[in-house]
Amino acid sequence: MEQPNQSYINSLSRGDEAFKQKLIDVIKKEFPEEKQVYLNNYNAKNYKLAADNVHKLKHKISILGLEKGYEVAVAFENNLLEGTTNQKEAFEAILNSITEYLEEI
């Protein structure tokens, strides 16, 4: 599975370590809660709210430089809005890779 791209995160911060740390801190703070809210809405079959959660999570995915993950998130958001769940496993694999990454740093 695709892992967060450190070189992309470094390029976003333009070498500013304080800014890079702030980006990571925001993701570490917000991601777990946003992931849980998404899971709750998905499990309750509230696909419109789950799509809203995916929309928020895809921005974190983008900040982490996960290009394929971003594409999956966009497709999954659209699936959910249509009432289908075709990309669920791929999307949740991305979320799990981010969770593992955040536990390591």
Image (spheres, grey):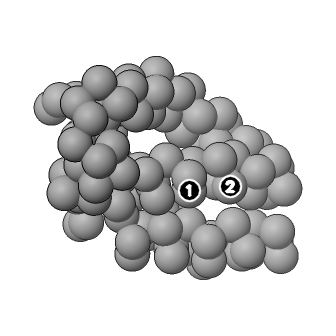
Question: Up-down: is 105 above or below 52?
Answer: above
- Discs 2, 1 touching: Cβ within 8 Å: yes
Point out which mark residue 95 bears: none
Residue at numbered disc 1: 58
Q: Is residue 102 visible?
A: no
Task: Point out residue 96 in the picture as x, y percentages from the top left corner.
Answer: 34, 48
Q: Is residue 86 visible?
A: yes
Residue at numbered disc 2: 55
Question: Up-down: is 64 above or below 17?
Answer: below
Quadrant showing the C terminus: top left
Q: Secondary structure at mark 1?
A: helix
Residue at image point 26% right, 35% down:
16
Question: Up-down: is 78 above or below 30?
Answer: below
> Please, what is the three-letter code of the amino acid marked with disc 2?
His
Task: Point out residue 84 in the picture as x, y percentages from the top left corner.
Answer: 74, 74
Q: Secondary structure at mark 2?
A: helix
CA neighbours of label 1 inside 10 A, class few (<14), some (14 to 19), many (20+): many
Q: Nearer the viewer, residue 84 or 54?
A: 54
Task: Point out residue 50 in the picture as x, y percentages from the top left corner.
Answer: 73, 50
